[in-house]
Image (cartoon, coloured by chain):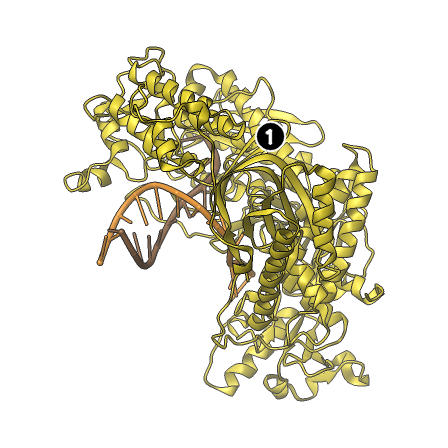
Chain colours: A yellow, B brown, C orange
Amino acid sequence: MQEPTPREDAWLWGWDATPGIVSVWAERDGRVLVWRRLGRDEVICERERFRPWALLSTLGDLRHLGDALREEGAPEAVQAKITYRELSGTGHLRFLVSAHDGRVLEAEILAGVRARGGKTPGRLAELGEDEIVWLPPEEQYLVATGRTYFRGLAFDDLHRMQFDLETTGLNAARERIFLIAVRTNRGLARVLDVAESGLQGDTAEADLIRRFAALVRETDPDVLENHNLHGFDLPFLARRAQILKVPLMLGRAGAPGLRQRNAGRGYGPVRDDAGEGEAERERGVRYIIPGRELIDTLDAVRRYDFAARDLPGHGLKALARHFGIAAPDREYIEGAQVYATWQREPDRVRHYALDDVTEAGELSRLLGGAAFAMATMAPRRYERLADAGPATGILDPLLVRAYLYAGEALPAFTPHDGTQHTGAALYLCASGVARRVIKADVSSLYPSLMRQYRIGPRSDRLGALVALVDRLVAQRLAAKDRAKAAPPGSTERHTNEAISAAMKILVNSAYGYLGAVGLTRFADVEAANAVTAHGRAILGQICRALAAEGVTLLEADTDGVYCAVPEGWDEADERAAVARVAAQLPPLVRLEFEGRYAAMLSHETKNYALLTYDDHLILRGVAFRSIKFEPFGETFLNSAVGCLLRDDIPGVSAAYRAMAQAIRRRELPTAQVVSRARLTKTSAQYYAVRATRREAPYEAMLNAGRATWGHGERVLIYRAAGGQHVLWDESRSDDRRDYDVAHYLRVLRDNYAVRLARAFTPEDYATLFAADNQPSLFAVPLDAIRPILTPLLAPEEIR
DNA sequence: TTGTCGCGGGG
DNA sequence: GTGTACGCGACAA
């Protein structure tokens, strides 16, 4: 492999060492404000100028300038209105033009385009991507200077403020803010609310917003953050401030008010859940403030879950519990109950809101490091990198900067030639119960293949994408080693884990970049297909080689294989077999021993249960875990599948009979049979369609005497004897247990017991899950029943 | 039944 | 000046 060169490090990190940049605010005219943190309590704002630039495919549209257009370095260039430089290579976008004032540059290019006839664009942004590269001013500045955010800073050096609004409802047009909790990573924790002011109505809310803005300015954080900040708190705050005519001065410079920027639908920020009659708000608007970065922890959560896929949901409370950051005395209040609780027990709501901001801050520290680390690499604002897709939002800017740094012309977008995109391989090789299971997988298969076979975009003359992947992989390994060597909980460890996470995201998006035709400049479907073809071949090779080692294949998916090893093997044997298979693979494709399990229930592709050697049950896939499951079903599945994998077959049957009996005798509390529903129709909408189609959640509302409800309300319902739908109130102390026994017995059988069907012959299954307590006369004794494993696919069939 | 759209979050 | 995934439920055909 090639030695690292300074050039490739400049591609990845930029080249200017200016430390401590925490925010950049640039104007089209070439003025830029740069905030730099020099110490814990010192932030300076530097006023600078940069030379706005654009990259054009032709100088034709600037010919009208005559002598006012000069080549860079020419003697007359100093007085020239616009200068240019022709980049090397064969790329399409080859003229780097610049001016003292970006508005002049824009005006002259537009004048030329209009003079050419045909188009009369009002803004450069309307020109085609094959005619021009015209970045937002901050990015022009960062690309041209080689600077990035946060050099020399650790994540905890940032001054981060979390704030959380408590409101009377979700609709900013008619509901109010009555409380704002504020917290920083430096120990501030404060609740501002309307009660403490003694004011009422508009005056109280306006006063609250003013006090909040004053606290932000006084505290002067670098970052404002919260969970769903862009989707709720900022738009709500902006709307209330507008309605109440309160100047909202939250930034470090400029006029009051939040400015908007467009953002795609991907992160779904602003949507008005107002219900009918309410003006639809534009989707995909985000807010920007000079001098402070606005960070939404929901973005970090989505990015994390994109790879990890192990989150129970994306709500703050569930996340905090999942990551173990919820305090033991955490106050919980249902969203819809917050205001009512405030009127009765204000201190509970204050506690609750402080718990919210505390968890948001912890969550940010836990998952926000990757975006922080990306901001030390890519030439974009931190807040943009925090919500950007890794391919179009990060790799693309890195490549554009790399080409300009190399003085190389950029290619035009590759047109879509209709080539079909081909995908990964997925095989279910056997279903049922297997023992002594191991998982072997290739970490980062696709980028490894890109590196191994030097597969990059055809138009990438510099080979920059594959070079970036090389550097990212090497430096990620180094960061992982540094993290491991650092003490747990230390800044050193956190920083290096964040770098590693960021690099992993970028490495894994390199393949997606290739396939994103029309979205990324260097997209190349054929290259992407070459990668997946190699991937399918490698998976097949791994499967056949493992089978030759004597193991039984269970499931193979993209880059990993579950299989069962023969009786008598110990862990050393397992590792040795995987190592022998790994040795047959190309050097950069690293097959790893990922885990070993006592047993596995293979149900369908991507749906299985595993029992670890320390007796933990892992359920994967919608067949085994879903938010829709009734609690009793979840309980039953856990115990029945647990018994199955522990080889306690009578236990499986006992779990079923016990649950059936608990339902039949109504020993099961009603809370165990409720299911969750979200009311997506308002009461009026439901009345309109009720005649044609009745739906359980709404019928439950009506039966409970609730004639009206809002959009988005979450309810718990169950089916009562006689088929009536009933609303379940968690806070109710009495429990009549009037649920529909026959219905829930069917649910137990058809939705839950059926998940174990692959583990048995049909006869044995019927015996184990007999409808009554008396197994049929012909049935075998329970302890004679053995689980089965059914082969579905021979190793030779995996190609 | 099958296909398409829209959601995930916040009070 | 953006742009995502994936699996699911709701709704329409």
In this view, A598 is above or below A330: below
The residue nearer to you, when weighing A369 against A725, is A725
* Quadrant in the picture for residue A599: top right
The location of residue A523, given as percent across then percent down, is 58, 70
Which quadrant of the figure contains the N terminus of chain A? Answer: bottom right
Question: Farthest top residue?
Answer: A734
Question: In percent of the image, x 63 and y 48: which residue is there?
Answer: A550
In this view, A509 is above or below A785: below
Question: In percent of the image, x 67 and y 46: which residue is there?
Answer: A370
The residue nearer to you, when weighing A77 against A313, is A313
Q: How many marks?
A: 1
The residue nearer to you, when weighing A753 against A202, is A753
Q: Is A199 positioned to the left or the right of C1 in the image?
A: left
- For disc 1, the chain is A
Q: Is A123 positioned to the left or the right of A568 in the image?
A: left
Assign a secondary structure to mark 1. Answer: helix
Q: Residues within 10 Å of mark 1 (few under 14, many from 20)?
A: many
Q: Is A300 positioned to the left or the right of A579 in the image?
A: left
Which quadrant of the figure contains the C terminus of chain A? Answer: bottom right
In this view, A762 is above or below A792: above
* Quadrant in the picture for residue A323: top right
Question: In percent of the image, x 58 and y 45: which residue is there?
Answer: A562
Question: In percent of the image, x 78 and y 84: which residue is there?
Answer: A76
* Amino acid at the residue labelled 1: Glu
* Quadrant in the picture for residue B4: bottom left
The location of residue A524, given as percent across then percent down, is 58, 71
**Residue A727 visible in rendering:** yes
The location of residue A712, given as percent across then percent down, is 36, 36
- What residue does disc 1 label? A359
**Residue A520 visible in rendering:** no
The location of residue A276, given as percent across then percent down, is 28, 43
The residue nearer to you, when weighing A612 against A458, is A612
